[in-house]
Image (tube, rainbow, N blue to C red):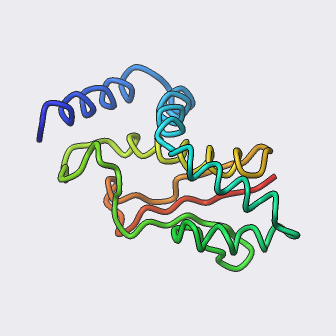
Amino acid sequence: MNASQRWIMTLVENLDLSVGEDTRAAVLGACGARCLPKTLKEKARKLHQNALREEDFLAELATLWPAVRREGKALAVVYPRCYCSLIKGLSDGLSRSFCLCSVGYVRELFEYATERPVAVSLITSIVGGGSECRFQVALH
């Protein structure tokens, strides 16, 4: 574990101890939203603008960003592993709360592309002991 990873662990541990879940979600979600590359946001918005139907947009987005999946009527973002470079190689001790930043990342992409509010829920994460990172997305 490097110094930056220790710092992140300490930050998230103290957020867990000091603030409620809504505040943790807001703070970490804002951090995750800032990680989203502008080029990906712009490509997603263009896909949405050019799509005739929501389903067309989602199909095109899944081509651009393979983590996007339609599972029946549900929309999910699923990662087979943790892609966060900040915690690469860190396997133990990090709070599941850290993954709330990924909620912000996913929400930012869909809100920017669709230009409307989107609800994203963390279902499971590798940091939390899951076999994958899974987020449920609700387009409004």
Is the residue 74 above or below the residue 125 in the image? below
Residue furthest right in the image? 52
Would you identify the image quadrant in which residue 95 lies? top left
Would you identify the image quadrant in which residue 59 lies? bottom right
Q: Residue at x 34, y 65 (%)?
A: 81
Q: Residue at x 54, y 38 (%)?
A: 33
- Left or right, 21 with respect to 90, comes to right
What x and y, as percent, mark residue 102?
48, 47
Is the residue 5 above or below the residue 80 in the image? above
Q: Residue at x 62, y 44 (%)?
A: 108
* Camera-nearest residue between 38 and 118: 38
* Camera-nearest residue between 95 and 115: 115
- Left or right, 45 with respect to 52, comes to left
What x and y, as percent, mark residue 114?
77, 51
Would you identify the image quadrant in which residue 97 lies? top left
* Camera-nearest residue between 101 and 57: 57
Residue furthest bottom in the image? 72
Is the residue 46 above or below the residue 61 in the image? above
- Left or right, 113 with respect to 104, comes to right
What x and y, as percent, mark residue 12?
33, 31
Is the residue 100 above or below the residue 89 in the image? above
Q: Residue at x 53, y 45 (%)?
A: 105
What x and y, as percent, mark residue 15?
38, 25
- Left or right, 90 with respect to 22, comes to left
Question: In which quadrant will I find the N terminus?
Answer: top left
